[in-house]
């Protein structure tokens, strides 16, 4: 449902806008880059010849073209796959876990040069001396589990923000500061925001939870990075 209060009252939530675009993609193609914020998504939609009609809860073409259909939330519900049942989600998760485990095992084995070396590493792992590396974003059963991990990742990432603050003190070029800011934002997207993308199914019936976690990230990560970079740029202007 659209926001009921606040400065965006009557406007669609970010998950609802994403849903419209997903339904649109059945016929056309608008790919949302990972980590895109509300403003980024709206600009992307407009650049593709559409606008978001919050009142009608629809994605509407701004230019009359036969190939640009109008998509509203009702049509989105009819076009997109129906939400999976608890049992279907359980089966799908089991399959994803098996696939993920298989990929991790194959990647691990590939890194080993010899069979004997592999046995030694496995023996050390069994003793708890080393842990098997993970390159896959974790998936969770509940939003509560996800949020607990999400909060830990944010707290951990704050160390990178501190490093960023100290690092740019040595910069005397505004462009350097901005480039470093972009790099840090991308790192934040990869380490933290990708958690939401990988667990998007959890938010099918709880748009507000997605919005709340996204806002939490913006307050704890995005705003401090922007403020630190902005302050340093102002210092260099003097």
Image (tube, rainbow, N blue to C red):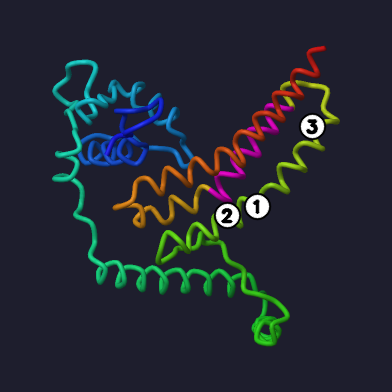
Q: Position of residue 79 (x, y in %)?
A: 16, 44
Q: Residue at x 20, y 52 (%)?
A: 81
Magenta-drawn segment: 177-192
**Residue tagged by mark 3?**
168
Quadrant for the N terminus, please.
top left
Compare marks 2 and 3 and give the one earlier in the sequence: 2
Q: Quadrant of residue 202?
A: bottom left
Magenta stretch holds residue 179: yes
Sequence-first tag of 3 and 1:
1
Mark 2 highlights which residue? 151
Q: CA distance from mark 2 to mark 3?
A: 26 Å
Residue at mark 2 to residue at mark 1: CA–CA distance: 6 Å
- In the rendered structure, the answer to whether residue 196 lies left or right of residue 233 reads left
| Residue 155, numbered circle | 1
Q: CA distance from mark 3 to mark 1?
A: 21 Å
Residue at left 22%, top 30%? 58
Residue 21 percent across, percent down from the top left: 29, 36
């Amino acid at each position: 449902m659209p926001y009921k209060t606040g400065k965006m009252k009557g406007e669609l939530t970010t998950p609802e806008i994403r849903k419209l675009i997903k339904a649109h993609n059945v016929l056309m193609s608008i790919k949302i880059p990972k980590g895109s914020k509300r403003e980024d998504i709206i600009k992307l939609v407009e650049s593709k010849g559409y606008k978001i009609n919050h009142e009608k809860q629809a994605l509407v073409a701004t230019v009359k073209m036969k190939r640009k259909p109008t998509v509203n939330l009702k049509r989105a519900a009819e076009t997109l796959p129906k939400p999976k049942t608890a049992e279907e989600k359980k089966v799908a998760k089991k399959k994803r876990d098996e696939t993920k485990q298989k990929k991790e095992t194959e990647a691990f084995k590939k890194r080993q040069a010899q069979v004997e070396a592999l046995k030694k590493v496995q023996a050390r792992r069994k003793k708890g001396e080393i842990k098997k590396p993970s390159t896959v974003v974790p998936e969770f059963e509940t939003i509560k589990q996800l949020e607990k991990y999400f909060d830990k990742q944010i707290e951990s990432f704050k160390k990178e923000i501190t490093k960023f603050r100290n690092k740019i003190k040595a910069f005397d070029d505004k462009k350097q500061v901005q480039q470093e800011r972009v790099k840090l934002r991308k790192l934040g997207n990869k380490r933290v925001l990708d958690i939401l993308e990988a667990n998007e199914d959890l938010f099918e019936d709880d748009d507000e939870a997605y919005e709340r976690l996204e806002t939490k990230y913006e307050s704890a990560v995005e705003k401090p990075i922007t403020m630190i970079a902005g302050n340093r740029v102002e210092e260099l202007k003097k």
